Each structure stands twice: as C-alpha cells, then as structure tokens.
Amino acid sequence: MEILRFYKEKSKKWYADIPMWTGRKSALQMISGADKLLDLIAKDRDEVYLHYSENEIKNADELTFTNKCWFNGADYKISKLNGEEIKLDVWLCNVTKFVMGYFPKKIYFKEIEYNE
C-alpha cells in the first residue's frame, strides 16, 4: 500500500513528508490547489495520511490529469471529494514523478488512519 503523509506547519503551509527526498524542502510544499485540497481533507487537523495509487481504490477520490506543464509538473482536476462536488484545479510538481515514476492519467487517493 502506497501511503504519503502530509503535514501543515505553523506557517499554514502544507508539505509532503518524503524521507528519501534529497532535494530542497521547498519542493515538497503543496501549492496551487494541492494546499486547498489538503485543507478540505484535513478540516482543522494539521496532518493527513493518504493511500494513493494509479489503480482504482474502492471508495477513493480521484485526480484526473489535464495538462503537462512545459516547465515543471502537471495539472490535475478533482470534481468530487467524499461524494460532494468541489471542482478544484490542482497542480502537482515533479515530486509526483519522484514518488510515482511519472504523471498518471488518474491518481486515486483515500484518507486513512495510520499508526506506524
């Protein structure tokens, strides 16, 4: 099971927690819609764990690829979250390629409780 932890710092900025990342921390910051999506998922919490896959996950939400950016990353859209319409555009940077190997046409994700 592929799991990613996201956390919000006191600065109100969201970051992906990727221990094997050797680049700048700033590259792990969630921006351009990804931060808004995490706010919606987390509600008032400052940490979430997401099970993600390019393969369909039962009862999961999905990001749909819309455009490869010429400079960095890719655009996705999400039209429903937990069954409710939201219509949000989300930009995912090249860290997505680091984690998944490329930019999938769909990324399925589901919040989970995680105990290490």
Image (cartoon, helix red, strand yellow):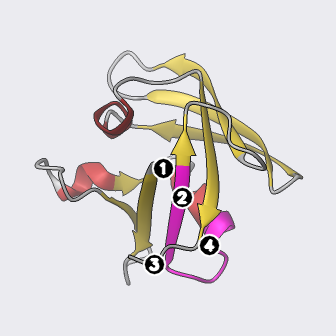
Q: CA distance from mark 1 to mark 2?
A: 10 Å
Question: What's the magenta region?
Answer: 39-51
- Residue wearing tag 1: 1
Farthest residue to the right: give it: 84
Q: CA distance from mark 1 to mark 4?
A: 21 Å
Residue ID at (57%, 82%): 45
**Image position of 93 with respect to 116: above or below:** above
- Please check the rendered image and state whether residue 43 is part of the magenta-colored stretch, yes or no: yes
Q: Of marks 1 and 4, which one's residue comes earlier in the chain?
A: 1
Disc 1 on helix, strand or loop?
loop
- Residue wearing tag 2: 50
- Residue wearing tag 3: 115
Task: In the rendered structure, find residue 79 and report the number of the disc placed on it.
Answer: none
Q: Of marks 1 and 2, which one's residue comes earlier in the chain?
A: 1
Residue 96: image location, x then y, percent: 38, 37
Q: Badge 2: how crowded within 10 Å, few (<14), some, or many (20+)?
A: some
Disc 2 on helix, strand or loop?
strand
Task: Judge depth for marks 4 and 3 and give the one in front.
Answer: 3
Residue type at mark 2 is Leu
Task: Judge depth for marks 1 and 4 and give the one in front.
Answer: 1
Residue type at mark 4 is Ala
Left or right of 9: which side holds 54? right
Q: Badge 4: how crowded within 10 Å, few (<14), some, or many (20+)?
A: some
Disc 3 on helix, strand or loop?
loop
**Image position of 87 with respect to 25: above or below:** above
Residue 35: image location, x then y, percent: 52, 58
| The one of 2 and 74 positioned closer to us in this rendering | 2
Left or right of 16: which side holds 57? right
Q: Of marks 4 and 3, which one's residue comes earlier in the chain?
A: 4
- Do residues under tags 1 and 4 come within 8 Å of each other at their CB atoms? no
Residue type at mark 1 is Met
